[in-house]
């Protein structure tokens, strides 16, 4: 085991943390379930949650959230059903740009997520980068604004064009980029909008310098829908004055649309509920907060909503977060722990000392996802506990309860419970305050929005 950076073994010994009656989950006992872990109930949680897929913002996801909340209430926790809202978008069925008299009519137009339906016909006018200053001359009123990418977000360009009276917008690229673009959210003031490539947009701009052009932009069949999902937040505070700090355990109760999500979703929730049961009557000096996220498979919406709900004080006092995801599959690899940077934060160090294997396999994937990312960006030290490499049926119909192993679930419970009690035990001193928790994640726009 590598040395604990900033949290030395000497300090842990001095605080009595390694004297807790919690046997490490070593190779010697990995095949047996400690009697203080209820393996049957763990498995039953997975069975009940994985009876049907639980896609984001559906009745089945809500039913899973209610199940989690009822279990936590039964264990004596104060619970809060935290609703949050977001939008989904169906791409248009028809998307066209036509320019009268233009020899090359094969315009390669693309849509913007959250772009409105509609038809706009009029003269085209070069509106620069689509800033407020670019529209001050009033020339865009009743016309189609040709706007170059850059300087402001796509949403701001369209909003400014609509405010200036334009009937439609064509945004042309300043770089070679095939990613889907977005307005960021449905706009309160908008007009039909399409995008053009750098090559076609620059040709159209040059043509406008030689004389007027009239065109039509048409967008049809797009659909923006407001979705509602829920996080379940449960907490237990010390009976008397404690450290003033918080330790967080998270999982997610949703699944992919066609998957029962026994491993990816239900296994983490089952482990969270068992940790909650084991901590329910234990004396603590640090607040324990348990959060089951919704809509993680829709772009980690639940974690983002939870982070947004926290005050700066909440972020500062949360000194560690343990995020459980896909911990029960018999076909996956070792129980691993990592964080976004692949370094040893407090929760990573404690999980590793409790039996998890440090690994950056999850971080090395091309797609950056995980419940821990939003927490980390908010300045909360966060560790992801999962199994790596993952099984081959993640988010597939084959992710069923039959693939779940009781002992592997119990191993995850053991590691998290041991790590959490090293923070919450009355014999342990308060850890250093989370000094970065007040630093909100950078609010820079994604390149897809600008």
Image (cartoon, helix red, strand yellow):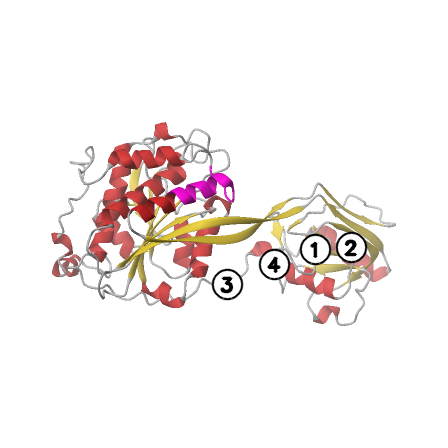
| Tag nearer the camera, 4 or 1 | 4
Q: Earlier in the sequence, mark 3 or mark 2?
A: 2
Name the main secondary structure of what is drawn in magenta: helix
In magenta, the rendered stretch is 54-67
Please name the residue that numbered disc 2 is placed on: 204
Q: Secondary structure at mark 4?
A: loop
| Marks 4 and 1, how far apart at CA | 12 Å
Q: Earlier in the sequence, mark 4 or mark 1?
A: 1
Whether residues under marks 1 and 2 lie with C-beta atoms below 8 angstroms apart, the answer is yes
| Res 60 label | none
Q: Secondary structure at mark 2?
A: helix
| Res 443 label | 3
Residue occupying image coordinates x 55% and y 52%: 86
- Horizontal side, residue 67 vs residue 352: left or right: right
Q: Looking at this view, is 113 or 428 the one in front?
A: 428
Q: How many marks?
A: 4
Whether residues under marks 3 and 2 lie with C-beta atoms below 8 angstroms apart, the answer is no
Of the 4 image quadrants, the one containing the C terminus is bottom right
Question: From what the image shows, is residue 418 above or below residue 259?
Answer: below
At which x and y percent is residue 408? 27, 36
Q: Secondary structure at mark 3?
A: loop
- Horizontal side, residue 305 vs residue 151: left or right: left
The local crowd at label 4, few if under 14, some if 14 to 19, many if 20 or more residues have their Cα within 10 Å, is some
At which x and y percent is residue 22? 16, 47
The stretch drawn in magenta includes residue 65 = yes
Residue occupying image coordinates x 20% and y 35%: 33
Please name the residue that numbered disc 1 is placed on: 172
- Horizontal side, residue 4 vs residue 385: left or right: left
Residue occupying image coordinates x 31% and y 36%: 333
Please name the residue that numbered disc 4 is placed on: 450
């Amino acid at each position: 085991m590598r040395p604990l950076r900033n949290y030395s073994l000497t300090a842990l010994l001095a605080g009595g943390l390694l004297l807790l009656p919690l046997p490490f989950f070593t190779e010697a006992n990995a095949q047996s379930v400690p009697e203080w872990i209820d393996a049957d109930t763990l498995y039953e949680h997975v069975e009940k949650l994985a009876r049907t897929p639980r896609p984001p913002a559906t009745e089945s996801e809500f039913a899973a959230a209610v199940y989690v909340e009822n279990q936590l209430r039964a264990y004596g926790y104060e619970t809060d059903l935290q609703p949050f809202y977001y939008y989904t978008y169906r791409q248009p069925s028809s998307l066209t740009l036509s320019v009268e008299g233009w020899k090359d009519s094969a315009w390669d137009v693309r849509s913007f997520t959250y772009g409105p339906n509609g038809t706009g016909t009029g003269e085209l006018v070069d509106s620069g980068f689509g800033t407020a200053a670019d529209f001050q001359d009033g020339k865009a009123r009743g016309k189609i604004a040709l706007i170059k990418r850059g300087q402001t977000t796509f949403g701001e360009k369209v909003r400014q064009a609509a405010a200036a009276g334009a009937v439609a917008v064509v945004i042309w690229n300043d770089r070679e980029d095939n990613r889907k673009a977005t307005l960021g959210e449905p706009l309160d003031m908008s007009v039909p909008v399409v995008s053009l490539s750098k090559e076609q947009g620059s040709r159209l701009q040059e043509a406008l310098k030689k004389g007027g052009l009239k065109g039509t932009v048409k967008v049809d069949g797009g659909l923006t829908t407001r979705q509602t999902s829920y996080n379940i937040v449960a907490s237990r505070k010390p009976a008397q004055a404690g450290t003033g700090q918080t330790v967080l355990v998270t999982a997610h109760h949703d699944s992919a649309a066609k998957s029962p999500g026994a491993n990816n979703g239900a296994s983490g929730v089952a482990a969270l509920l068992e940790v909650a049961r084991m901590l329910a009557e234990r004396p603590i000096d640090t607040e324990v907060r348990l959060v089951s996220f919704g809509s993680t498979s829709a772009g980690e919406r639940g974690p983002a909503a939870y982070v947004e709900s926290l005050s700066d004080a909440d972020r500062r006092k949360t000194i560690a977060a343990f995020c459980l995801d896909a911990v029960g599959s018999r076909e996956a690899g070792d129980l691993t722990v990592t964080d976004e940077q692949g370094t040893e934060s407090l929760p990573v160090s404690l999980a590793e000392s409790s039996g998890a294997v440090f690994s950056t396999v999850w971080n090395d994937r091309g797609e950056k996802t995980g419940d821990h990312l939003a927490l980390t960006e908010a300045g909360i030290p966060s560790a992801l506990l999962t199994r790596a490499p993952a099984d081959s049926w993640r988010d597939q119909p084959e992710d069923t309860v039959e693939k779940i192993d009781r002992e592997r679930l119990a191993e995850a419970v053991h590691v998290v419970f041991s790590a959490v009690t090293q923070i919450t035990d009355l014999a342990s001193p308060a850890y250093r305050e989370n000094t970065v928790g007040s630093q909100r994640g950078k609010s820079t726009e994604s390149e897809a929005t600008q």
